[in-house]
Amino acid sequence: MIHACTLAMELHIPESSSLKGKRAVVKHVIETSRSRFGVAAAEVSYQGKWQRSEVGFAAVSGSPGQVVEVLDAVERFVWSQPDLEVVAGSRRWLESE
């Protein structure tokens, strides 16, 4: 059976004064999460805002525990970033037949 879950995190980047500055912070989060945790990741909302972003992550595994473990690690990593503040986060499990 396939177990898949998405994690959406809404972010505030208070020190950003341009889209270029915001994108540097968001790019670091996305690329590090992909390489370190093996998740799919992308900025999914607020691309035109200087200090706001929503980043989506997805993990897939044969074990639900493994998915939870990976997304927990991603969430801890994002929370640990000094250049941003987490505004909200949510998870959604995807059903498979």
Image: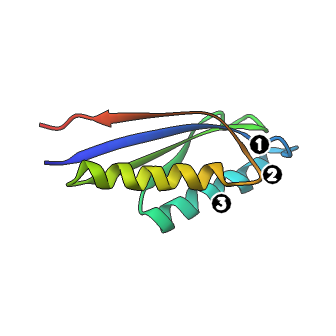
Badge 1 local density, few (<14 within 10 Å), some, or many (20+)? many
Q: Which of labels 3 and 2 is toward the front?
A: 3
In which quarter of the view is residue 5 placed?
top left
> Which element type, helix, strand or loop, lies under badge 2?
helix
Q: Nearer the viewer, residue 65 or 17?
A: 65
Q: Position of residue 41 (x, y in %)?
A: 49, 51
Q: Nearer the viewer, residue 54 or 18?
A: 54
Badge 3 local density, few (<14 within 10 Å), some, or many (20+)? few
Q: Are marks 3 and 2 in contact (CB under 8 Å)?
A: no
Q: Which of labels 1 and 2 is toward the front?
A: 1
Q: Give the residue number, with chain letter if any, for mark 2.
A: 21
The structure's colour scheme is rainbow
Q: Position of residue 12 (x, y in %)?
A: 73, 38
Badge 2 local density, few (<14 within 10 Å), some, or many (20+)? some
**49 up-or-down from 77: above or below:** above
Report the amino acid beneath label 1.
Answer: Ile
Going from N to C along the chain, the mark reached first, 3 or 2, is: 2
User: Residue at 22% of width from left, 53% of height from top?
Assistant: 63
Q: Give the residue number, with chain letter if any, for mark 1.
A: 13
Going from N to C along the chain, the mark reached first, 1 or 2, is: 1
User: Residue at 36% of width from left, 48% of height from top?
Assistant: 68
Q: Disc 1 to disc 3, how far (Cα)?
A: 13 Å
**78 up-or-down from 50: above or below:** below
Going from N to C along the chain, the mark reached first, 1 or 3, is: 1
Q: Are marks 1 and 2 in contact (CB under 8 Å)?
A: yes
Report the amino acid beneath label 3.
Answer: His
Q: Give the residue number, with chain letter if any, for mark 3.
A: 28
Q: Is residue 25 left or right of residue 44?
A: right
